Image (cartoon, helix red, strand yellow):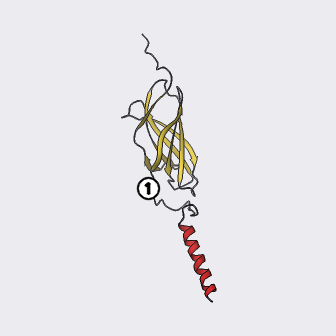
Amino acid sequence: MYKRLMKPIIMAAIGCLLSSNAMFAQVNPTTPKTVRGQITEGPALESSKDNWAIITWTSNNPGGTEEHFGVVHYGTDPSSLTETAKSHIRLNLSHPYTVFRVRLDDLKPGKTYYYTVGSMGSNGADDGIKSTIKQFTTTGEPERASR
C-alpha cells in the first residue's frame, strides 16, 4: 500500500521540478510577455572595415511572434541618430535569450559613429528594448576636404 501511494507523489514532484526549470519549460508563441525585455550582453562592435560594421548584442527573449528584427539607429552625431539598419531573425521561443547581429553598410572610412540598438516584431511593434548610446570608429583614412 505504501509503495502505491509513493509513486504518484514522486511523479508529481518530478513533474513540478521539470516544469519550473527554464530548460524544460515550454513557451507558447501566443503567450504574452511576462518579463520586460532587456539587453543582457553588449551591444558591441563585432567587426568593421572602412565602409561597414557589424553590431551584436544579446537580450532576454522578447516574446511575441517568431519573426523579429534587430534594429540599429546610428549616425555621426550622438544627438542625431538618423540612419537605421535592420536584420531579420527568427526567434526560438523555447530559448531564454536571443543574439542579434546587424550589419551597417555605406559607412565613411575613419569616421566615428554613434548607435543604439533594439528589436521589433515583424509587425513593426517595438519590443521596448533600447541600449544606451555606444560608439565605434571605422578603419581607413578619413576623406580629406578638397581645396
Q: Secondary structure at mark 1?
A: loop
| Residue at the disc numbered 1 | 36
Percent from the top left, x then y, of residue 47? 54, 33
Considering only vertical position in the picture, is 143 above or below 101?
above
Q: Position of residue 31 (x, y in %)?
A: 52, 62
Instruction: List the single residue furthest toward the bottom.
Output: 1
146 is higher (above) or lower (below) than 63: above
Identified at 43% across, 15% down, the residue is 145
Given residues 21 and 96, the one toward you in this image is 21
Dividing the picture into quadrants, the one containing residue 74 is top left
Is residue 97 among the parts visible in the rendering?
yes
The residue positioned 60% from the left and 85% from the top of the image is 5
Q: Amino acid at mark 1?
A: Arg
Residue 103 appears left or right of 1: left
Question: Could you say where residue 64 lies in the image, as x and y percent from the top left?
Answer: 52, 56
How packed mark 1 is, by other alpha carbons closer than 10 Å (few <14, some 14-19, many 20 or more), is few
Q: Quarter holding the C terminus?
A: top left
- Horizontally, residue 63 falls left or right of residue 8, namely left
Q: Quadrant of the N terminus?
A: bottom right
Q: Could you tell me residue 45's position as x and y percent? A: 50, 36
